[in-house]
Image: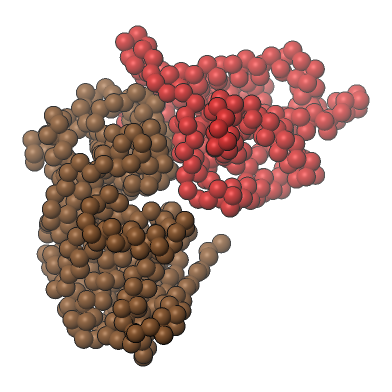
């Protein structure tokens, strides 16, 4: 059943660009990318692989890292713990890669982390997540609840909402996000009208929606598992005629677009939206379009951090002057990279302050950026690091 | 009021989803584990039909046709040799379900599909605005139930089906073409399941594995209902009510396993379930 798919990509690129004015001698620096090509993440993983390919192609064309070419090694982790164990083992001990950079489910990350520590490799985790995962070997450049929730709550409150109803899928990420939302709303003087969860494979939200209607809430915030539960909940909310302000902490731009009329008016909060207006984002989207054409997967809040993380690793290796794990780990918090999401540095307890964008889904499916909060601090994620 | 409507429409949804499985199990005594795949096929019929610019409502008759044809094909190719080996039939239909889901994944990708909804909006029910689509489902379930009873009681096919249910050897000895009765039954069951899939699209995400989450509930309900339409309707109403009440007052997480747990308890205490005979 399990498909193990490995791609030796960078080497090929290195030979293609070998004739150009680039120094590409020596052993390639290999970046291991364990990612969910099958399972729950299979919808988003292709975009992550594409942005990695672009980063590596650009770096090699510009002379590699310390004059060495860069290669990537993609391994399917099946989006879960078991697959991640074998994927991380393969990359760390068999392929002996120099670094691991990837987005993963929380279960896969937790399974892979001990292997990274045992193999003494640097690891950059590029997914947003529920927060507070700490390891001397791991750096994170995606958002945590402390960064994603405040813009949403503040916008809803500015529009007059006081009583909030929270709906989620019953798993670590869903509960973690809503737990933080509840504390944040209460600290801002708001009220929680209700908080309800359905199992991840649940498909009938009827009773929760009736409780929402009866609760007198004037805004609803949801944090479901991505994909099916998110769509099912949104459809049923809309079918029930629910028209109160609706913020969805788990929907990405592509899904919102595909949902059509049902998504209109949904608030989403992200560190990356395709509509971000800066030269880096324009250049990134142009390069993606040029490289992948019609096959391009829409860049998202997972694939862009992946792209930036590869550049952050490049900066750290150049600062350290080597790919030695200790030297790279010491350099990682000190370097920064200006990418599509702005200036990124993983300087706060292995996490990154991020500019957060608040988007509102328009009737035509596009996402309009309503407001943004610059440099939102991730808070005390790992006080011991 | 909203609670009563929730109970009625939840029961209706359970009835619609379980109906196709019920027809096949009731007459053929075969548990069709490809049922989930048939729901998915119905939903993807909507995706195809609306993709070609057809009205979403047209996908109902289309799914009936597609489900029926594929059902007939399945009966002839896979199920026919297995009537005397019900355990093998479970394996075969389960395998068929896996194959169908993979074929759909190959054809459409893993991504979710977003066909336009059949109908939206709400209706004012005694002061409570309520989803008009859920009310439509309630009507659809009632119509489906009435048609079931009429077909069974008032038509040649229903009479033949009852004969096959009661004593197949005798039915065949009396010159009845029991093979044809079986094929038509399987066709009908598949067609109804595909239509149920279409009816799910406004409430559920449409992706290759969408049917799975509905399978266990439908399976349990059919187990406690045996061969009686009235028993199935009663089971859907009782367990649908239990699900809504537990979800509303206790916890939606417990509510989502209520149907499975209650059915298991019932089968333990009263093996015939809601069936009288």
Above or below, comparing residue A38 to residue A362 in the picture: below
Above or below, comparing residue A25 to residue B235 in the picture: below
Q: In this orientation, which residue lies closer to the viewer: A371 or A147?
A: A371
With B248 as the anchor, is A134 left or right in this view? left
Query: Residue at left 17%, top 44%?
Result: A371
With A161 as the anchor, is A273 left or right in this view? right
- Chain A, chosen colour in render: brown
Q: Quadrant of the C terminus of chain B?
A: top right
Residue B207 at what x, y percent from top left? 50, 44
Query: Residue at left 16%, top 73%?
Result: A335
Residue A189 at what x, y percent from top left? 8, 35
Residue B135 at what x, y percent from top left? 46, 18
Q: In this orientation, which residue lies closer to the viewer: A138 or A284?
A: A284
Task: Name the quadrant containing residue B1.
Answer: top left
Residue B253 is at least partly visible in this image: no
- Chain B, chosen colour in render: red
With A259 as the anchor, is B75 left or right in this view? right
**Extreme residue in the top direction:** B126
Above or below, comparing residue A229 to residue A318 in the picture: above
With A90 as the anchor, is A358 left or right in this view? left
**Extreme residue in the bottom direction:** A26
Q: In this orientation, which residue lies closer to the viewer: B125 or B218?
A: B125
Query: Residue at left 47%, top 48%?
Result: B111
Residue B65 is at least partly visible in this image: yes
Query: Residue at left 29%, top 62%?
Result: A283
Q: In this orientation, which residue lies closer to the viewer: B107 or A327?
A: B107
């Amino acid at each position: 059943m399990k498909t193990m798919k490995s791609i030796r990509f960078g080497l090929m690129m290195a030979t293609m660009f070998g004739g150009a004015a680039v120094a590409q001698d020596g052993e390639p620096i290999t970046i291991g990318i364990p990612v969910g090509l099958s399972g729950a993440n299979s919808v988003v993983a292709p975009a992550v692989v594409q942005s990695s390919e672009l980063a590596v192609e650009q770096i090699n064309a510009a002379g590699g890292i310390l004059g060495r070419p860069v290669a990537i090694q993609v391994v399917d982790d099946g989006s879960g713990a078991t697959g991640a164990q074998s994927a991380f083992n393969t990359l760390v001990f068999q392929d002996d890669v120099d670094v691991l950079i990837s987005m993963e489910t929380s279960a896969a990350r937790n399974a892979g982390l001990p292997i990274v520590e045992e193999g003494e490799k640097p690891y950059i985790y590029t997914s947003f997540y529920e927060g507070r995962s700490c390891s001397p070997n791991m750096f994170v450049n995606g958002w945590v609840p402390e960064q994603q929730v405040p813009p949403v709550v503040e916008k809803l409150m500015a529009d007059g909402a006081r009583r909030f109803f929270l709906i989620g899928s019953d798993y670590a990420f869903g509960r973690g996000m809503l737990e933080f939302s509840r504390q944040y709303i209460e600290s801002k003087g708001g009220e929680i009208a209700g908080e309800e969860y359905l199992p991840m494979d649940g498909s009938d939200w009827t009773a929760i929606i009736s409780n929402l209607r009866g609760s007198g809430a004037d805004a609803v915030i949801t944090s479901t598992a991505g994909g099916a539960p998110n769509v099912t909940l949104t459809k049923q909310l809309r079918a029930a005629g629910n028209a109160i302000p609706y913020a969805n902490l788990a929907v990405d731009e592509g899904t919102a677009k595909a949902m059509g009329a049902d998504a209109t008016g949904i608030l989403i909060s992200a560190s990356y939206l395709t509509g971000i207006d800066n030269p880096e984002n324009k250049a990134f989207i142009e390069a993606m379009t040029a490289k992948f054409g019609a096959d391009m997967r829409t860049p998202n809040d997972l694939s862009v951090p992946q792209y930036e993380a590869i550049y952050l690793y490049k900066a750290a290796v150049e600062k350290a002057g080597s790919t030695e794990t200790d030297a790279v780990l010491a350099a990682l918090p000190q370097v920064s990279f200006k990418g599509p999401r702005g200036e990124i540095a993983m300087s706060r307890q292995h996490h990154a302050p991020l500019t957060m964008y608040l988007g509102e889904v328009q009737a035509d499916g596009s996402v309009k950026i309503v407001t943004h909060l610059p440099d939102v601090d991730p808070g005390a994620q790992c006080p011991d690091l | 009021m909203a609670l009563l409507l929730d109970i009625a429409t939840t029961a209706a949804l359970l009835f619609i989803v379980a109906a196709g499985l019920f027809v096949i199990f009731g007459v053929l005594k075969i548990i069709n584990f490809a049922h989930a795949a048939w729901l998915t096929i119905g939903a993807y019929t909507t995706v195809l039909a609306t993709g070609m610019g057809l009205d979403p409502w047209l996908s109902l008759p289309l799914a009936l046709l597609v489900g029926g044809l594929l059902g007939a094909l399945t009966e002839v190719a896979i199920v026919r040799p297995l009537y005397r080996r019900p355990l093998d039939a479970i394996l075969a239909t389960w395998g068929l379900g896996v194959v169908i889901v993979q074929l759909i994944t190959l054809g459409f990708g893993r991504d979710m599909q977003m066909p336009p909804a059949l109908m939206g909006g709400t209706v004012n029910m005694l002061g409570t605005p309520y989803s008009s689509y859920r009310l439509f489902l309630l009507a659809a379930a009632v119509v489906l139930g009435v048609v079931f009873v009429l077909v069974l009681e008032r038509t040649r096919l229903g009479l033949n089906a009852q004969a096959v249910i009661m004593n197949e050897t005798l039915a065949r000895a009396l010159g009845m073409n029991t093979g044809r009765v079986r094929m038509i039954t399987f066709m009908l069951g598949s067609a109804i399941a595909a239509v149920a899939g279409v009816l799910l699209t406004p409430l559920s995400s449409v992706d290759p594995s969408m049917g799975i989450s509905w399978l266990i509930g439908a399976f349990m309900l059919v187990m406690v209902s045996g061969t009686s339409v009235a028993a199935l309707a009663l089971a859907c109403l009782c367990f649908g009510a239990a699900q809504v009440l537990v979800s509303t007052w206790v916890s939606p997480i417990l509510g989502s396993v209520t149907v499975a747990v209650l059915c298991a308890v019932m089968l333990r205490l009263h093996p015939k379930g809601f069936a009288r005979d």
